[in-house]
């Protein structure tokens, strides 16, 4: 099954989505902010990155910019999962944005589509 890097600064959300994704058969690694995510990416190349937008230390905007600047990660799809959506306009460095709270069915359908390259 596909590997996913899940990034969120809220431990309850991180734990819940990690459990849901693992129950669906995904291999999940977690990070609590963008800087931790970048460090994890030095050791693993996931099929999908799911990240919150508003986080301390390194937010989702900076994480997306850094990922798209790395040749080995530039093609990895990014799902933004956030209660505060990214601003309109400017360069869009992600593939899909889902607004919290999102139902599990829509979340899992979107994850599957991104992992299969159907977005």
Image (tube, rainbow, N blue to C red):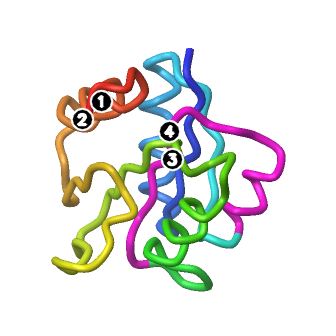
For the residues labelled 3 and 4, the Cα–Cα distance comes to 4 Å
For the residues labelled 1 and 2, the Cα–Cα distance comes to 6 Å
For the residues labelled 3 and 2, the Cα–Cα distance comes to 17 Å
- Residues at discs 3 and 1 in contact (Cβ within 8 Å): no
For the residues labelled 1 and 4, the Cα–Cα distance comes to 12 Å
Q: Residues within 10 Å of mark 2 (few under 14, many from 20)?
A: few
Q: Quick one: SS at disc 1?
A: helix
Q: Residues within 10 Å of mark 1 (few under 14, many from 20)?
A: some
Q: Which mark is residue 104?
A: 2
Q: Residue furthest front?
A: 71
- Residues at discs 1 and 4 in contact (Cβ within 8 Å): no
- Residues at discs 3 and 4 in contact (Cβ within 8 Å): yes
In this figure, which residue is indicated by the disc labeled 1? 108
List x then y, in percent, for residue 22: 52, 26
Q: Is residue 21 magenta?
A: no
Q: Quick one: SS at disc 4?
A: strand
Q: Which mark is residue 55?
A: none
In this figure, which residue is indicated by the disc labeled 4? 48
For the residues labelled 3 and 1, the Cα–Cα distance comes to 13 Å
Q: Residues within 10 Å of mark 3 (few under 14, many from 20)?
A: many
Which residues fall within the magenta stretch?
36-54
List x then y, in percent, for residue 58: 58, 80
Location of residue 86 (image quadrant):
bottom left
Q: In the image, is 52 to the left or to the right of 89? A: right
Q: Quadrant of the N terminus?
A: top right
Label 3 vs 1, first from the N-terminus: 3
Q: Residue furthest right?
A: 43
List x then y, in percent, for residue 20: 42, 31
Q: Which residue lies at the image location 32% right of the left edge and 50% below the top edge?
A: 95
In front of the other: label 4 or label 2? 4
Q: Quadrant of the C terminus?
A: top left
């Amino acid at each position: 099954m596909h590997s996913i890097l899940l990034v969120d600064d809220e431990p309850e959300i991180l734990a819940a989505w990690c459990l849901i994704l693992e129950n669906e058969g995904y291999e999940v690694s977690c990070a609590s902010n963008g800087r931790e995510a970048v460090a994890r990416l030095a050791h693993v190349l996931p099929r999908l990155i799911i990240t919150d937008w508003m986080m301390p230390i390194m937010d989702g905007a900076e994480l997306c910019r850094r990922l798209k600047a790395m040749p080995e990660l530039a093609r990895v799809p990014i799902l933004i999962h956030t209660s505060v959506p990214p601003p309109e306009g400017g360069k869009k460095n992600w593939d899909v944005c889902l607004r919290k709270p999102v139902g599990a069915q829509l979340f899992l359908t979107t994850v599957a589509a991104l992992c299969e390259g159907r977005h």
